Image (tube, grey):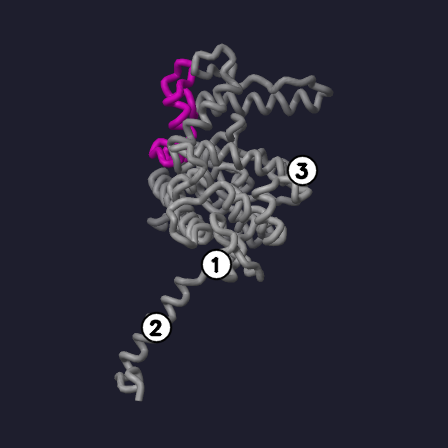
Amino acid sequence: MTAISTMPMEQIAIVLVVAFIAAVNSRPPKDIVARDVVLMDMEDPAKDLGERPVLSVDKIVPPDHLDAVRLEQDGHINKDFHKEAFLGNHEEIDDDPAPVAESKLHDIFKKVDTNGDGHMDVNEMHKWILMKINEHFNESVMENAHIFSHMDPQKKGYIEWKEYYRHFLLAKGYENSKAAKHVEDYDTIDMKDDERESLVRYKFRWTDADQDNNNKLTEEEFLAFRHPEQSKITLNNMLETILNGLDVDKDDMLTEEEFCALPPGEIVGEEQKEMDRKWQEERREEFKNSIDKNGDKKADKNELLVYVDPRNPDQARSETQNLINMMDENKDGLISMEEMMMNKDIFVSSKCVDVKRVLHDEF
């Protein structure tokens, strides 16, 4: 007779529940794609680690843009910032049919309106935005830990660039034997141009995250590689890149004119001129209302860092006020359900019609 068969029914139930929870927690996230492939130790290719699933491409590559950060690395305004700050994973709404998306917005409104008075006030919105930002950070850390563990099965505590490179090739569908050979001899695979260009970008990001310059990333450095918005070091590197591109007089500050200067190139036609005018108008408003806090018509590095760092409490307060200003039709300082739905385009867009979203600038 087994030990479990002698237990009271209550104890058996508890044992089964605990076993079930442990099994669920040990499963990889659903976005890890199972595939019959043998991954071997990069330091010892002859050592078989057994069959392991291959990470999907969207988990291997860093996100194209920074979540809940106002500026991209090229200095362009993040068009999705309002959605990311207020909705978190706004893809769940963007990809829905209009009636479903609107229904979800109704549900979100009710969650934000904690006192149930039919309005979102500044305090309720501020708390909600802080919660969504913290959710993003917590989810990123948990996801990063799982991916890092998957890529470091021997628990070395670091991932080498060649290991990452190999996982990238596997995710792209290259056979294991070819991927293993290619990371040693780059001429063995005829890679697509866009894949090569992506790897060059990722290598620059890898170098930014590699604080001790050993071409290996610890789990913390790997988080900075995948989510630079969580690392002050990589955010500072991002600011240097922005300043290099926009700071004409090289005084380590941005004037309003520098921030709003049109990219070089010939303007053709009235439609293009109107688009450029609106683009500059948008950037002037952003500079005055969100960057130049002391009103001296210049933004130094500290002001810019506050502006791009989503962890800074000022970011949530500023975004709360921005959203209220955009949606508050009757100027009473509150947002009703009707006002939110009148301005739903702030949060909901269709990939079928929103060309700017489809052509989102990559980070």
Disc 2 marks a residue whose amino acid type is Val
Whether residue 212 is in magenta: the answer is no
Counting from the top left corner in percent of width and height, residue 238 is at 46, 28
The CA span between labels 2 and 1 is 31 Å
Which label sits on residue 17? 2
Compared to 195, does 172 lie above or below?
A: below
* Magenta highlight range: 290-319
Taking the spot 30% from the left edge, 82% from the top edge, the residue there is 4
Disc 1 marks a residue whose amino acid type is Leu
Q: Secondary structure at mark 2?
A: helix
According to the picture, the residue beneath numbered tag 3 turns out to be 193
The CA span between labels 3 and 1 is 32 Å
Taking the spot 51% from the left edge, 32% from the top edge, the residue there is 204
- Residue closer to the observer: 12 or 119: 12
- Residue closer to the observer: 355 or 190: 190
Q: Residues within 10 Å of mark 2 (few under 14, many from 20)?
A: few
Report whether 314 appears left or right of 355. Answer: left
Compared to 292, does 95 lie above or below?
A: below
Q: How many marks?
A: 3
The CA span between labels 2 and 3 is 51 Å
Taking the spot 42% from the left edge, 38% from the top edge, the residue there is 224
Compared to 64, does 73 lie above or below?
A: above
Q: Secondary structure at mark 1?
A: strand
